[in-house]
Image: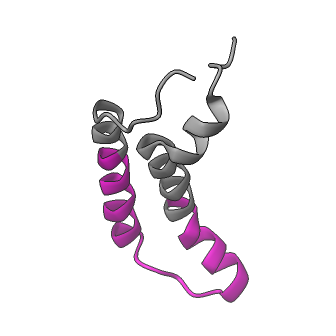
Amino acid sequence: MKLIPNWKRVATKSHSVRAMVVGWIIFNLPDVIYLTTQVDLNPSTFSIIGNALFLYGLVGRLVDQGIGDA
């Protein structure tokens, strides 16, 4: 596996990477809240937000983000 030349720029600027990072946080947040506060939240809310972020990431892969090759 070889990284693309501008991987740092892509990692900080691309919509899909942002959506994956925030989606990962959203999907894990109910567990973290439960483990730290013993408050049980409705996971459906977080599932809807997480799925919307993944959809945003898919659309973000198709949009020209002006990152370029270099």
Give the vertical position of 53 relative to 39 (above or below).
above
53 vs 6, nearest the viewer: 6
Residue at the extreme top of the image, as rendered: 1
Q: Kindly identify the residue that appears in the image at 65 percent across and 86 percent down.
A: 38
Q: Is residue 53 magenta?
A: yes
**Residue, x 51% and y 58% (percent of image)?**
22
Image quadrant where residue 11 sits: top right
**Residue 29 or residue 12, whichever sits in front:** 12
Q: Nearer the viewer, residue 30 or 24?
A: 24
Q: Residue 40: x percent and y percent?
A: 52, 82
Residue under the image location 42 percent in, 69 percent down: 43
Farthest residue to the front: give it. Answer: 70
The quarter of the displayed image where residue 37 is located = bottom right
Residue range of the region highlighted in magenta in the rendering: 27-56
Task: Specify whether residue 29 is painted magenta.
Answer: yes
| Residue 53 to residue 62: above or below | below
Colouring scheme applied when the structure was drawn: one colour
Which residue does the image show at 57% across and 23% down from the upper left?
Answer: 70
Which secondary structure class fits the magenta region best? helix
Q: Nearer the viewer, residue 46 or 68?
A: 68
- In the rendered structure, the answer to whether residue 36 lies left or right of residue 63 reads right
Q: Position of residue 50 (x, y in %)?
A: 39, 57
* Residue 5 x, y percent position in the rendering: 65, 20
Q: Quadrant of the N terminus?
A: top right
Q: Where 26 falls versus 21 (above or below)?
A: below
Q: How many marks?
A: 0
